[in-house]
Image (cartoon, grey):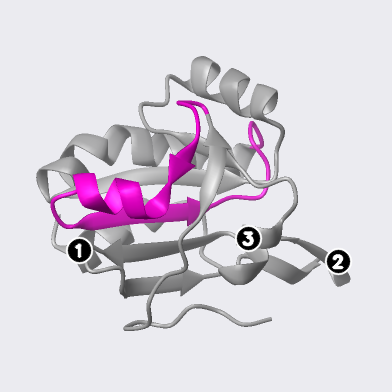
Amino acid sequence: MSRLSEGEIAPDFQLDSTVGPIRLYELLDEADQGVVVYFYPKASTPGCTTQACDFRDSLSSLKSCGYTVIGISADKLTSLEKFRDKQGLNFPLATDQSKNMLTEWGAYGEKKNYGRVFRGVIRSTVVVNKDKTVKLAMYNVRAKGHVERLRRKLGC
């Protein structure tokens, strides 16, 4: 499984989302600094809820630093809409049920949980600069405290 590295060009994507079709390069055109793309395993699970709510609560700070946020999982769009509504999420959630984009970005692959090996979405965050290069690529992150660590790295 290949992962994105800092400095390389982030692949464009177009996915269905809770705000309609969404495309990375269009988001970059609208952002002042860049886009925070975060990947999470499953909507409405404890870790994913913690992480999503941390992004929700930090969105104004990230926006004031010029960053847009998008969350991506392999969940069905209806699950994402329920998750958004239940948690009051204020940023788009996108679905990649084919897992093609998740794989291309290094956010889908082999994982271990309690000694069991399986394939799934790897909790990750990639920050893409306005010039389409990867500013930060963080894989296998912990949900709790992740957004705070990300904000420190971005100076937000």
Would residue 80 be found to the left or right of residue 32 on screen? right
Q: Is residue 45 left or right of residue 63?
A: right
Location of residue 72 in the rendering, given as x and y in whole percent from the top left corner: 55, 46
Label 2: few (<14), some or many (≥20) within 10 Å?
few
Where is 32 relative to 111, above or below?
Answer: above
Structural distance between the alpha carbons of marks 2 and 1: 32 Å
Q: Is residue 29 visible?
A: yes
Residue in the image at 10% along x and 43% along y: 64
Q: Read off the residue under disc 2.
A: 118
Magenta stretch?
18-45
Q: Which residue is mark 1?
A: 154
Residue at (42%, 44%) from the top-left corner? 70
Q: Nearer the viewer, residue 32 or 155?
A: 32
Q: Nearer the viewer, mark 1 or mark 3?
A: 3
Q: Is residue 29 magenta?
A: yes
Q: Nearer the viewer, mark 3 or mark 2?
A: 3
Residue under the point 56% across and 68% down: 105
- Kindly state the secondary structure of the residue where label 2 is placed: strand
The amino acid beneath tag 3 is Leu
Q: Which residue is mark 3?
A: 102
